[in-house]
Every structure is written in structure tokens, then in C-alpha cells.
Image: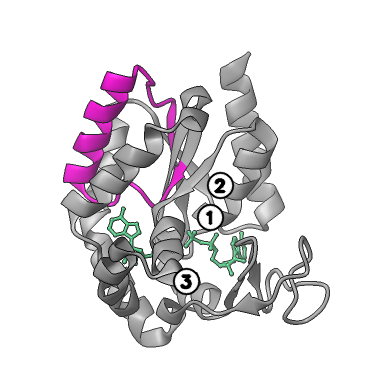
């Protein structure tokens, strides 16, 4: 199963991609997570991308495409994947198409989680992540059982530096570069729009039935 997640920052792509990956036993490949891991580890890639992430700006296409190319070349992606946060520009979408053709892994769906912009600021500024396993929470909408601790692994929760109001504004502006992808995938007949303005369980139920139906 090869799917990508589309939607505004805060639409719920990561939340849903985590569930898909667990249920369908495919790797969850998030370019944002990969960049944050590189920054945390202080690698050359991390040093190069840090300024972009902190400001909420997109990392240049050539660098991002290279990172995804290497990741999709790893053996665990041979049986499928859920891509989250990539592609985000038309050149990235075109590069992905070429790459998947070479790997003979056709995309089944672009899952477009649609939410009104009005809900995003509250979702993003209240987001918390587990430092240890990356699980996503929200201080109001998806609070952990014990404040500041991950339900899954007990790790400490933190706030992303780009979930500040200022960086969120820039990220929402940068989405203008991603918006044309909805039409790009609609034209290819693989866009599926999901109403993301419901509880995460209800959103996932729609995704699960779609993915299960396509398998049988
Ligand atoms: P994205 O990956 O699209 O940026 P996330 O999955 O990280 O978005 O979700 C952003 C924030 O909104 C997180 O704090 C998450 O817990 C919360 N969230 C995700 N889905 C929903 C939902 N359906 N309803 C309310 N809050 C949600
Ligand atoms: P995310 O975790 O998906 O919200 O991404 C966090 C940040 O990582 C973005 O604001 C960008 O700075 C960078 N990033 C992630 N994916 C991409 C991408 N496909 N293209 C360019 N920049 C990206």
C-alpha cells in the first residue's frame, strides 16, 4: 500500500498517518520528523535545514527530494509506505512520480484531510509531541493521561519550536506552494478528500474503510 497525506499544517496528517502505519504495517515516512531528527542529532543535514524549520519555511526541493529518495530506497519501503508532509510542491510531486515509477510502486491514494483554516491555530499551538517516540498529543483535544508524559512510552512531551503563533502564520502562507497538489492528484484520479473536522477516530474510520476496500 502506497499512500500520501495531503492537507494544511495541523489538519491531522501525522495523527492519521501513525494509525495507518500501525494498522497496515507500513512505515510512516514524515519528512518533518526526519528533518527534526537530523537537527536533534546535529548532522550536516540538520544544520542545513534548521533555519528553514525554525522560520516555518519550506526546505529547498533538491534537498528534500534527495532525503525522500534515500528513504524510499530502504528495504522496509518495498512493501508500501505512508508519506506524510511530502510532497509539498509541484516539483516534489513530479520527482515522486518519477521515483515511484523507477521503483515500480504506484501510488494508490492521495488522502486529502480537509479542515477549515479557522481550526488550525488552536490545533498547532496546543500540539505536544513525545521526545522519545514522536507520538502526537494536544493539550485540549487529545490530552495525555498524565500531564507532560507520553501514554505510549512515558517519555517527556515537548512543544515544537515552529508551533509558535509567528511560525504557524508563515507555514500557513507557505501552504500556497502545496495547494496545487490537490488538483495534481485529482487529475490523476487518486485524490480522496476526507472531512478532518471531526474526532480523530471518526476521521480514521473513513480512511480505514477506504484503504480496506481497496485491498479486497
Ligand atoms: P499535521 O501532521 O497535519 O500537521 P497533526 O496530526 O500533528 O497535524 O495534528 C495537529 C494537532 O491537532 C495535534 O496536536 C493533534 O493532536 C491535533 N489533532 C489531530 N487531529 C485532530 C482532530 N481530528 N480533532 C482535533 N484535534 C486534532
Ligand atoms: P511538518 O512536520 O510536516 O509540519 O514539517 C515541518 C517543517 O519541515 C516544515 O515547516 C518545513 O520547514 C520542513 N518540511 C517538511 N517536509 C517538507 C517538504 N516536503 N518540503 C519542504 N520542507 C519540508
208, 130: nearer the viewer: 130
The residue wearing badge 3 is: 120
Asked whether disc 1 touches disc 2, contact meaning CB atoms under 8 Å apart, the reply is yes
72, 196: nearer the viewer: 72
Indicate the position of residue 46 as horizontal and vertical percent values: 33, 66
Q: Earlier in the sequence, mark 2 or mark 3?
A: 2
Q: Residues within 10 Å of mark 1 (few under 14, many from 20)?
A: many
Which of the numbered marks, if any, corresponds to residue 17?
2
Of badges 2 and 3, the one in the foreground is: 2
Residue 106 lies in the magenta stretch: yes
Residue bounds of the magenta highlight: 83-110
Q: Earlier in the sequence, mark 3 or mark 1?
A: 1
Which of the numbered marks, if any, corresponds to residue 47?
none
Marks 3 and 1, how far apart in space?
Answer: 14 Å
Residue at position x 31%, y 33% in the image: 186
Marks 2 and 3, how far apart in space?
Answer: 18 Å
How many marks the image carries: the answer is 3
Q: Is residue 41 above or below residue 140?
A: above
Residue at position x 58%, y 29% in the image: 210
Label 2 CB sits under 8 Å from any ligand 1 atom: yes
Label 3 CB sits under 8 Å from any ligand 1 atom: no
The residue wearing badge 1 is: 14
Q: Of helix, strand and loop, which one carries label 3?
A: helix
Indicate the position of residue 43 as horizontal and vertical percent values: 35, 65
Indicate the position of residue 167 as horizontal and vertical percent values: 34, 80
Of badges 3 and 1, the one in the foreground is: 1
Q: Of helix, strand and loop, which one carries label 1?
A: helix
Residue at position x 33%, y 43% in the image: 68
- Can the viewer see residue 9? no
Amino acid at each position: 500500500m502506497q499512500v500520501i497525506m495531503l492537507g494544511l499544517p495541523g489538519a491531522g496528517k501525522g495523527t492519521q498517518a501513525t494509525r495507518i502505519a500501525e494498522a497496515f504495517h507500513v512505515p510512516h515516512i514524515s519528512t518533518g520528523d526526519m528533518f527534526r531528527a537530523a537537527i536533534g542529532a546535529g548532522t550536516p543535514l540538520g544544520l542545513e535545514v534548521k533555519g528553514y524549520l525554525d522560520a516555518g519555511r519550506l526546505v529547498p526541493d533538491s534537498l528534500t527530494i534527495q532525503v525522500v529518495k534515500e528513504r524510499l530506497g530502504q528495504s522496509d519501503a518495498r512493501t508500501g509506505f505512508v508519506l506524510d508532509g511530502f510532497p509539498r510542491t509541484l516539483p516534489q510531486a513530479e520527482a515522486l512520480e518519477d521515483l515511484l515509477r523507477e521503483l515500480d510502486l504506484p501510488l494508490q491514494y492521495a488522502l486529502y484531510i480537509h479542515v477549515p483554516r479557522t481550526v488550525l491555530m488552536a490545533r498547532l499551538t496546543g500540539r505536544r509531541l513525545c521526545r522519545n517516540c514522536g507520538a502526537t498529543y494536544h493539550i485540549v483535544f487529545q490530552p495525555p493521561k498524565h500531564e507532560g508524559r507520553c501514554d505510549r512510552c512515558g517519555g517527556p512531551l515537548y512543544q515544537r519550536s515552529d508551533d509558535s503563533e509567528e511560525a504557524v502564520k508563515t507555514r500557513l502562507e507557505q501552504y500556497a506552494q502545496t495547494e496545487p497538489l490537490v488538483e495534481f492528484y485529482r487529475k490523476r484520479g487518486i485524490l480522496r478528500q476526507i472531512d478532518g473536522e471531526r474526532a480523530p477516530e471518526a476521521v480514521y474510520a473513513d480512511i480505514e474503510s477506504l484503504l480496506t476496500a481497496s485491498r479486497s
